[in-house]
Amino acid sequence: MILVVRPEPGLASTLAAAKEMGLNAVGYPLFEIESVGWHCPDPDAIDALLIGSANAFRHGGDALGGLRSKPVYVVGNATGEAAREAGFDVAAIGAGGLQHVLDDVRSGTRLLRLAGAENVPLDLPRDVRVETRTVYKAVPLELPEPLRALQGLKLTVLLHSAAAARQFDAEARRMALHRGGINLVTIGPRVASNAGKGWADIHVSDAPNDKAMLELARARCI
C-alpha cells in the first residue's frame, strides 16, 4: 500500500499516476497551502522570475499582474505549465532543483524569486542577483486516526518535500506508528535527511518526479 501525503493539487496528480501504473495508493495531505500577502518590488528592477513551485502562480494573487512581461525560469514541466496558464512566458525549464535552473540564467540578470515560507538556499552564480518574496505557506495537518491501520499493510510513504518528511516523522511519533514496518520513498536526498530514523528503509528517487518515485516504490517496497 502506498500513502501519498503531498498537498493538493499535487496529491490528485500523484494518485492518478499511481493508478495508471496499476499501484494501490491512497492519499491524505499533510499540508494545506495558503496565500501570504506580499509586496511586489518595482518591475523595472527585475529582469526575470525564478519559480520552484506552481504554488507561486496559484497563490501569488493580484501582485502577479505587474510581472507578466517578465520571462520565467522554472523547475519542472508542471511549474512551466502553471506559468503559461497564468500568462507568463517560460524562458527555461530545469530539473533537479532550482540550483540547476540557475545554470541557464545569463550573467547580470536580476531575478525575483517567488517562493514558499520554507525554501531552499541557493548558491548564486557570479553577477546574478536574486530578490525573494514569500507568496505562500504550507500549514501542517494531522493524519486522521483511520490511517493508523495502514501500517499493517506493508506501507510505503511518498515524501515530496523536506517539510513533508518532518511532518510525517512528527505524526508517526504522535500516532505511535510502528516505523519498522514503514518504507519511505523520497524525491531527493535533502528530503531523506529530514525524515528521521527507525524506518524499515528510506529510498531516494533517481529523478525528482512522480513516475520515478512510483517506479522505485514498486521495485523496492511492494
Image (tube, helix red, strand yellow):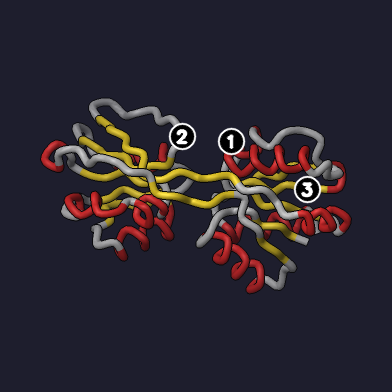
Q: Secondary structure at mark 2?
A: loop
Q: Residue at x 15, y 42 (%)?
A: 43
How packed mark 1 is, by other alpha carbons closer than 10 Å (few <14, some 14-19, many 20 or more), is some
Image mark for residue 183: 3
Q: Amino acid at mark 2?
A: Val
Locate residue 89 relative to residue 33 in the image: left or right: left
Q: Secondary structure at mark 1?
A: helix
Image mark for residue 74: none
Residue position for label 2: 120
CA separation in Å, label 1 and label 2 = 10 Å
Please state the horizontal and vertical placement of residue 91, each as a whole percent of the image.
26, 52
Locate residue 155 relative to residue 47 in the image: left or right: right
Residue position for label 1: 190
Please state the horizontal and vertical placement of residue 93, each as a whole percent of the image.
36, 52
CA separation in Å, label 2 and label 3 = 25 Å
Residue 206 visible in the current orientation? no
Q: Amino acid at mark 3?
A: Asn
Q: Which of the two labelled residues, at mark 1 and mark 2, occupies the earlier sequence position? A: 2
**Discs 3, 1 touching: Cβ within 8 Å:** no
How packed mark 3 is, by other alpha carbons closer than 10 Å (few <14, some 14-19, many 20 or more), is many
Please state the horizontal and vertical placement of residue 175, each as a whole percent of the image.
79, 44
Q: Which of the two labelled residues, at mark 3 and mark 1, occupies the earlier sequence position? A: 3
Q: Secondary structure at mark 3?
A: strand
Q: Which of the two labelled residues, at mark 2 and mark 3, occupies the earlier sequence position? A: 2
**Discs 1, 2 touching: Cβ within 8 Å:** yes
Q: Amino acid at mark 1?
A: Arg
